[in-house]
Image (cartoon, coloured by chain):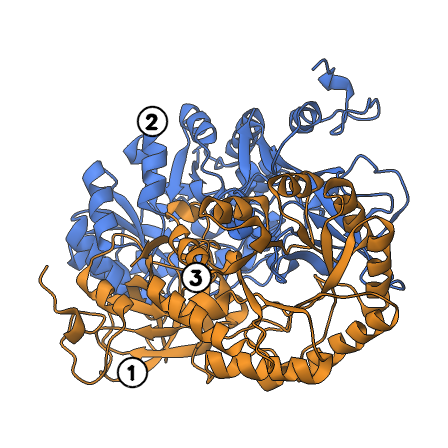
Chain colours: A blue, B orange
């Protein structure tokens, strides 16, 4: 296929008005039998470098990035991040196997899930992992028994009403318990290494970290006052991606977060950050297809547009219409109208956007290609194995 | 392992008080490295026979069951249903391949998804499928072009506020459009074969079908008055499974539904029913494990109980706490207390029951086995490929 990638948009039409991403150019030049996520690993590298450039303290200390593997565990992404010196935040034995398989150093791997089977802790410790998250007594006992002498950081609960997607109370312990857990670690022969928290997914601007950091700093200082020599502040994720609402760019964002931390914590020996979405979301687009456009009744004001991808084949984060993806079609420029967007399965819950319909070209019809932008995070792995007989989301890394 | 299955409960304890299911006995006799759905294919056969026995009209005509493959497409279940003479409702090319692979007759396969790619319609028609669902003009054109001469049934929208889980407006057309679509089918050389609808998932008692049947019968009679010689009434699914609230048993339920249909439709040439959940849900249990029990704060009234299975590894139907599964543990009989139940992933949305906490033994702890009952439908296929590095739900058929 002879396509001049620099001069075509995502649908192969010549463009002169704007540079087109490598990903959209790739989609233009290829046909896909099934919905496919196309990832640009060079874009991941640029984002890693941009975040790293901001994650530096005033006295020149580099905070260490531990990429949240769950966002996108594709081997080519892990391989590139290993080469760049990234660390990894892993949720399971399966993710540890992935990162070690790509050559990650065990000293750069943190077992960040607070919910771990005893057998998985034992296995992880056996391969050399020495850093574990914990938020409960029973978990601390499991770690002490299965990873004796390991370093642990206690995850605390913080409230952040400013995040686009505030986390539930599923992870972390309240402040009254944090110091007890640090003491318990010491008593059980573990190293009470530090604290972690999560500001909330998709925290769009650095200033939104303020309230959270105030709460964590209070616990940090109380722990220091109680004699704990804390070494690690794990600031978790929350780094945003662009989904239509303005966000601060990565270097400025990371730098501003570090300033806020320094103001509250003073000189922290080691800061760790765990971007997942903020590392990979903008590096990928999904190539999809319109399967049907219809109206339910002759006098309906809006159309239903059905795609070949839905909530159970990659777009799980549209649950509650939380994440609002951006769409591009070969008919952009035509008149638009509101439509309900839904997936292809025989499941009435497989609807992407209904409460807030989206605008799409009125000329859109079955068979049209559609590009879903900034889908690099939390798509492939959420995909079901074969719901309704549809294969899981493919992923191609360019 | 020497276990007398007839005298053990799901945890291997001797029981004398009640017969234990084959599934729970199997779970008692085995260890599972990962969460595993255990299905009893004989129980599926019993349910098929019970539903069939009820799906008979007063003049002795047998309504035909088309099992909704999406509920559980395991090959051993399909194979058994083929042997029993069941038909199949399929959602995709993938499901057609599954049922034909187990020997299903193409004349017993209905392509029931109203959202189909043109290429999949063409492929299905090529292998011999001649019966298709439709609810929109664009879909009708695709069928006429890719499956010329096929029989089509028009899916209509009905409102049923009585279902436990009313369906959205995703599928079907309003009554004003139904007759237009039947006419369009005839004009395009297709056979306007009948109507279909869905009463809503988990419609617990037959009497709850009344309002829906009234609406569909009105359309049916209008179509007849307009000269359409309708042959097929596809009554869809909605057949319930036991999730803690009382339901009518299958033969009585099916029989009562048929009576309601006869009262409203008169003599229908062919009635088709598409039980999915109602066929397989009660034939399977999931063997799972408690990973962590904790409190967030010293003075919390309830505990958090984390399992090794969650919303993204098989229990998707707990979304919105819609389906409330039943649990059994080796500590049943001990004092109980309320708990929030959550999955093992690092995803704050991976919480099963929080608004209405469930009662579990206070003595429950990490490592305990837990049986989740009546999980035979809509679990394995909803499971994500590897979210957080966790493998998808296993399935064993006994």
Report x, y in % for residue B187: 87, 51
SS category of the residue bearing label 3: helix
User: Chain under label 1?
Assistant: B
Q: What residue is at 54 percent from the left and 57 percent from the top?
A: B88
Quarter of the rendering occupied by the N terminus of chain A: top right
Quadrant (top left, top right, bottom left, bottom right) of the C terminus of chain A: top right
In this rendering, would B299 be left or right of A322?
A: left
Which residue is at 47% across, 30% downward?
A77
Query: In percent of the image, x 53 and y 55: which residue is there?
Result: A200
Residue at x 42% of width, y 31% of height: A86
Nearest the camera: B362 or B135? B135
Q: Nearer the viewer, residue A295 or B81?
A: B81
Q: Nearer the viewer, mark 1 or mark 2?
A: 1
Let me know if residue A358 appears in the view: no
Q: Which mark is residue A368?
A: none
Decide if residue A381 is on the left or right side of residue A46: left
Closer to viewer: mark 3 or mark 2: 3
Q: Residue furthest front?
A: B59
Q: Which mark is residue B84?
A: 3
x and y, in percent, of residue B74 in the image: 41, 53
Q: Which residue is mark 1?
A: B336
- For mark 1, does the 10 Å Cα neighbourhood hold few (<14), some (14 to 19), or many (20 or more) residues? some
Circle 2 residue: A103
Q: Quadrant of residue A304?
A: bottom right
């Amino acid at each position: 296929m002879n396509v001049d990638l620099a001069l075509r948009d995502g649908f192969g039409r010549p463009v002169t008005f704007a540079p087109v991403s490598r990903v959209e150019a790739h989609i233009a030049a290829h046909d896909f039998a099934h919905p496919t996520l196309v990832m640009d690993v060079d874009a991941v590298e640029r984002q890693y470098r941009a975040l790293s450039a901001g994650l530096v303290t005033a006295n020149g200390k580099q905070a260490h990035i531990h990429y949240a593997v769950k966002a996108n565990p594709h081997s080519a992404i892990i391989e590139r991040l290993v080469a760049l010196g990234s660390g990894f935040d892993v949720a399971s034995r399966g993710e540890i196997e992935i990162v070690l398989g790509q050559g990650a150093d065990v000293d750069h791997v943190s077992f960040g899930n607070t919910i771990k089977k005893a057998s998985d802790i034992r296995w992880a410790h056996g391969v050399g992992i020495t850093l574990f998250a914990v938020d409960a007594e029973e978990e601390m006992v499991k770690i002490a028994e299965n990873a004796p002498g390991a370093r642990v950081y206690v995850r605390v609960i913080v409230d952040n009403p400013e995040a686009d997607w505030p986390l539930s109370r599923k992870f972390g312990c309240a402040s009254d318990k944090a110091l007890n857990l640090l003491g318990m670690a010491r008593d059980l022969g573990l190293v009470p290494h530090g604290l972690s928290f999560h500001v909330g997914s998709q925290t769009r601007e650095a200033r939104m970290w303020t309230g959270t950091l105030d709460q964590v700093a209070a616990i940090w200082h109380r722990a220091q006052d109680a004699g704990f020599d804390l070494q690690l502040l794990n600031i978790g994720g929350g780094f945003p991606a662009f989904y239509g609402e303005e966000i601060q760019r990565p270097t400025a964002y990371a730098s501003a977060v570090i300033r806020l931390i320094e103001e509250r914590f003073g000189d922290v020996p080691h800061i760790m950050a765990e971007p997942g979405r903020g590392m990979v979301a903008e590096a990928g687009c999904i190539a999809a297809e319109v399967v049907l456009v219809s109206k339910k009744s002759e006098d309906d004001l809006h159309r239903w547009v059905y795609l070949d991808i839905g909530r159970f084949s990659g777009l799980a984060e549209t649950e509650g219409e939380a994440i609002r993806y951006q769409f591009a079609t070969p008919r952009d420029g035509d008149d638009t109208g509101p439509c309900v967007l839904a997936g292809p399965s025989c499941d009435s819950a497989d609807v992407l956007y209904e409460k807030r319909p989206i605008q799409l070209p009125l000329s859109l019809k079955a068979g049209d290609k559609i590009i879903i932008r900034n889908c690099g995070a939390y798509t492939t792995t959420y995909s079901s194995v074969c719901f309704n007989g549809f294969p899981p989301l493919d992923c191609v890394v360019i």
